[in-house]
Amino acid sequence: MSERRIILKTPGLTMRFGGLTAVDNFDIEVQEGRIVGLIGPNGAGKTTCFNMITGFYIPSEGNIFFYDEEITGLSTHKVCAKGIARTFQNIRLFYNETVLQNVMIGAHLRQKSSWWQAPLNMPSFLREEKEVKDRAMFLLEKVGLADLAGEQANSLPYGEQRRLEIARALATQPKFLLLDEPAAGMNPQESWELMHFIQKTRDDFGLTILLIEHDMKVVMGVCEHIWVLDYGKLIAEGPPEEIQANPKVIEAYLGEEYLENA
Amino acid sequence: MMGNRMRNNTLTLLAVVGLAAFLWWADGNFDGYKIQIMNLIAINAILAVSLNLIYGFTGMFSLGHAGFMCVGAYVSSLLILPSSQKQAIYILEPLIAPLQTAHAPFVVAVLLGGLVAAIFGLIIALPVLRLGGDYLGIATLGFGEIIRVFANNLVPITNGALGLKGIPDYANLWWNYGFMLFTFYFIFRIVNSNFGNALKAIRDDEVAAKAMGINTYKYRVTSFTIGAFFAGIGGALLASLLTTIDPKMFLFIMTFQVLMIVVAGGLGSITGSLIGAVVITILLEWLRFVENPITLGSFEIPGIPGMRMVIFSLSLVLIILFRREGLMGMRELSWDSLFRRFSKRGEAE
């Protein structure tokens, strides 16, 4: 197999809140173009890792490298400008805005014209606004929400809100996409569709995807490599088959007794 | 869709022409009192929509509007006051030298008033917009007071508590409504651009906006500064309309009045601010009767000065309790929505 570039490296990433170590020595390397997963029981520190990577938290120790470039402690919007986009565990759309506006807001980052050109009606400004709108429509078609472009975001059903959040993240033109529990609250049919959607998105946009997920069917079905976090520490990593058979992982999820009785 | 846009632009143009015709007619037929109210409507609309940009569209609870108005009013007044008048009114201490001779045409003076207010807005925004929510409200409230105290004490510039008198009354219907149209056009274009979408994103969910690569701090500062600019313009026009200003004019009650228009009209609705300005300005005048003695049968209520502000405060409380979104909510009154409403009614019949 050809050598892939490392898109994300986090040597010794640690996050402490006062006396509590939420994430301890989180050390992963993500290869470009992969779909990889981060799993672990509730409260293991998965979202904290996301928050460190995307600049919401400044890590207490350790570094984050995005393609060999250090991004540790960079503010959130700059991290996004570098090419890392994310979704949230509890969906965070702009609920008063339309579906189309939500995606356009994502695309705003790559817009060059500035606000004072709006009242002047400058041709270059109008052209760029139209480009942004077209691109947003294109993304909505990709995620199958084009028909709902004019609807207010809070009127969408749950599953479609999830897809809108992904479309919005894609509008920032990321290279690396972090999905925080994309299948949460979905029925088996929906999460099955989601798996294919994630794979198709990766292929269409040439992305690398890191996802947090509790739905094991999704994780095992879509991820090529998995890290397992428990009480802030990495306890295992490897391809899905290995993870499934790893006693440490089973213990973390199902408890010691389960192993003894098995 | 293209046809609709043509239709809408034509209708907007017609509405502006209609407004101009009405102003022309009113100018000849209305008495001074009614014309004064119409002027106040235009200025209040400018103030309301500028606060709406800050509070309604960007979600920054700012209570410093009177401060920006004060800056705009003093800057513009000092530029249009004739030199002789300046010499006559600065009794306590003479006006400092460069301002003594400074003079500018009315438009330039008003725009400069806005500009200086915007600079003040920028200076206050840089530290204060690191705060959010209620803290921001308190900090901007304090700022407004600081400006007023400065106006009271910087006697060589502001003439202290005596204020400025005999400001030329250039601000007639045409100037006021001209500036109102300019303000509305400017803010409408901004709010409806993708930059405006980004501001609304910050209002809706700042965390998500950051994650979308929006430099929320910078955007908030920008929005705040633009709002301060138009507040300064509103203050400048008000000064010329009333021909006399003093620091006591720019008490918190002034901010409150603008805030009331914005909330009543609808936070995040430009047309709401216009409707709010019309309704509230007229009501404020009409309600003056409650301050006069009223006879109910054999029962006589003595006139209580300030009673209409009590009524207005109460009505603001009622609005917040029962119709928090105001008259328009976040919706806009547009030609499309009007046509839809009328065609629906047509179908129902």
Image (cartoon, coloured by chain):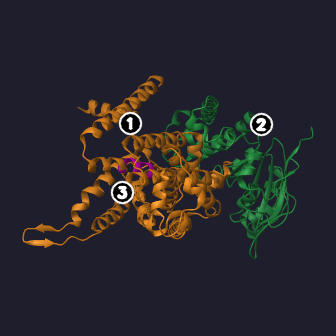
Chain colours: A green, B orange
How many C-alpha atoms fall within 10 Å of the one at disc 3: few (<14), some, or many (≥20)?
some
Amino acid at circle 3? Arg
- Residue behind mark 1: B337
Separation of residues labelled 2 and 3 (CA atoms) = 48 Å
- Residue behind mark 2: A206
Amino acid at circle 2? Gly
Vertical placement of residue A92 versus A222, above or below: below
How many C-alpha atoms fall within 10 Å of the one at disc 2: few (<14), some, or many (≥20)?
some
Quadrant of the rendered structure where residue B27 is? top left
- Residue behind mark 3: B323
Considering the numbered disc 3 on the image, is that residue within a helix, a strand or a loop?
loop
Q: Residue furthest left?
A: B298
Q: What label sits on residue B171 in the rendered view?
A: none
Image depth: mark 1 or mark 2 in front: 1
**Image quarter (top left, top right, bottom left or bottom right) of the C terminus of chain B:** top left
Amino acid at circle 1? Ser
Chain at tag 1: B
Chain at tag 2: A
Q: Which residues are magenta?
A: B40-48
How many C-alpha atoms fall within 10 Å of the one at disc 1: few (<14), some, or many (≥20)?
few
- Asked whether residue A93 is drawn in magenta, I would say no
Q: Are marks 2 and 3 on the same chain?
A: no
User: Going 7% across and 71% down the picture, which residue do you hit?
Assistant: B298
x, y percent for residue A57: 73, 62
Considering the numbered disc 2 on the image, is that residue within a helix, a strand or a loop?
loop
x, y percent for residue A196: 68, 38
x, y percent for residue B210: 66, 53
x, y percent for residue B348: 26, 33
User: Going 63% across and 59% down the picture, which residue do you hit?
Assistant: B123
Identify the mark nearer the N-term, 1 or 3.
3
- Asked whether residue B41 is drawn in magenta, I would say yes
